[in-house]
Image (cartoon, rainbow, N blue to C red):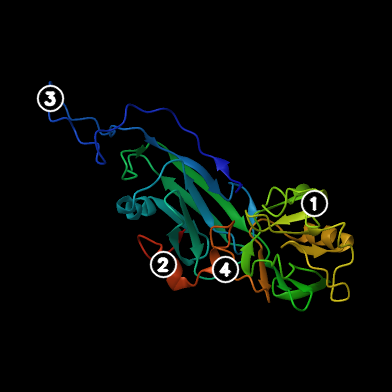
């Protein structure tokens, strides 16, 4: 799952009578002002990513996941209450991926060294479905070194750069013709020293007699998509490269030494760009593949359009 800080909140009253939580119309028993807190159950945030205090890569979006659907009519107001500030002015925009997830990404990658803050002041804000925010949320994070990896499926190589300078070129194998790797740019979701991988869990095969069946715990795993794409070492493909040309089930394979080295280089939000696969680009919401949408496509999913970060 996508990682992020848990945004918990208190309970709420019974459901509102309508989208706008209108008053009942009964005469007031007092001349004092009406309460400013709207009626209705709370609108809460499930997660905000990145977590506060972290250092992430240049392709990392701000990703906000709501516990309940946000109606289209309420999204412009919700976006305006999710203020993005940065130490360097950056143009960007929100984009809705369904009705529970909104991502903010810069038009181009973040400048390395930028400090970023998201202030989601949801108090009293309607989700358009009878719920109102009861909390404010703030996350502050930093953009670290500009680390990128460019994978050529046909060339069996991964070129790693840091702040524009080449660091190392690694030998890789990617997906087979039957199980091709996703193309496009995917920001690293997370990484783990060991991951238990099974063919059944990703819908390839649950039949132990199948040549495509596997049940393995493998090391040095860089997570690229929620659908199960990793850069990692595989015991079934220990010496990847053009000489072996053995296809994977969609992951990118490195040798054991290269996988361990690469694991030490990358962090959440670093862009891994894969080219040469016939599968096409990973959907933007399959992890953090936000940059697989062109800017016009990105703005088409925004309720408030392009803006510039506030000064920090």
Foreground mark, 1 or 2, reads 1
Q: Which residue is mark 2?
A: 299
Foreground mark, 1 or 4, reads 1
> For the residue carrying disc 4, how many other residues have a C-alpha within 10 Å: few (<14), some (14-19), or many (20+)?
some
Question: Residue reaching furthest left?
Answer: 27
CB contact under 8 Å: marks 1 and 4: no
Say above or below: 182 vs 70: below
Instruction: Please report the residue visible at 80 percent of the width from the left and 54 percent of the height from the top.
Output: 220
- Element at label 3: loop
Question: Which label's residue is closer to the chain start, 1 or 2?
Answer: 1
CB contact under 8 Å: marks 1 and 2: no
Foreground mark, 2 or 4, reads 2
Q: Decide if residue 50 is on the left or right side of residue 254.
A: left
- Element at label 2: helix
Report, in whole angstroms, how far the alpha carbon at label 1 lies from the one at label 4: 37 Å
CB contact under 8 Å: marks 2 and 4: no
Report, in whole angstroms, how far the alpha carbon at label 3 lies from the one at label 2: 45 Å
Report, in whole angstroms, how far the alpha carbon at label 4 lies from the one at label 3: 54 Å
Question: Which label's residue is closer to the chain start, 1 or 4?
Answer: 4
Question: Residue reaching furthest bottom?
Answer: 155
- Element at label 1: loop
Foreground mark, 1 or 3, reads 1
Report, in whole angstroms, how far the alpha carbon at label 2 lies from the one at label 4: 16 Å
- Say the numbered circle drawn on residue 109: 4
Residue 202 image point, x, y percent: 68, 52
Instruction: Please report the residue visible at 52 percent of the width from the left and 65 percent of the height from the top.
Output: 88
Residue 266 quadrant: bottom right
Question: Which label's residue is closer to the chain start, 2 or 4?
Answer: 4
């Amino acid at each position: 799952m996508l990682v992020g800080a848990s945004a918990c909140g208190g309970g709420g009253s019974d459901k509102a009578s309508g989208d706008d939580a209108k008053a009942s119309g009964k005469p007031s028993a007092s001349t004092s002002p009406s309460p400013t807190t709207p009626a209705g159950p709370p609108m809460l945030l499930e997660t905000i990513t990145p977590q506060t205090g972290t250092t992430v890569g240049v392709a990392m979006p701000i990703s906000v996941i709501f516990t309940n659907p946000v109606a289209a009519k309420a999204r412009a107001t919700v976006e305006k209450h999710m203020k993005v500030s940065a130490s360097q002015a950056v143009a960007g925009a929100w984009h809705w991926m369904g009705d529970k997830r909104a991502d903010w990404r810069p038009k181009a990658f973040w400048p390395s060294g930028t400090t970023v803050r998201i202030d989601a002041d949801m108090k009293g804000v309607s989700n358009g479905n009878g719920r109102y925010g009861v909390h404010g949320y703030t996350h502050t994070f930093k953009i670290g070194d500009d680390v990128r990896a460019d994978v050529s499926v046909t060339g069996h190589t991964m070129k790693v750069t840091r702040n524009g300078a080449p660091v190392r070129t690694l030998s890789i194998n990617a997906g087979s013709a039957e199980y091709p790797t996703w193309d496009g740019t995917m920001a690293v979701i997370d990484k783990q020293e060991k991951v238990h991988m099974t063919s059944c869990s990703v819908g390839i095969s649950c039949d132990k007699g199948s040549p495509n069946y596997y049940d393995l715990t493998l090391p040095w795993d860089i997570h690229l998509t929620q659908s199960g794409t990793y850069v990692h070492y595989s015991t079934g493909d220990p010496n990847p490269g053009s000489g072996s040309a053995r296809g994977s089930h969609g992951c990118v394979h490195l040798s054991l030494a290269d996988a361990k080295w690469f694991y030490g280089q990358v962090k959440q939000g670093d862009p891994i760009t894969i080219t040469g696969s016939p599968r096409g680009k990973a959907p933007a919401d399959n992890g953090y593949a936000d940059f697989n949408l062109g800017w016009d496509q990105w703005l088409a999913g925004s309720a408030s359009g392009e803006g510039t970060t506030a000064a920090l």
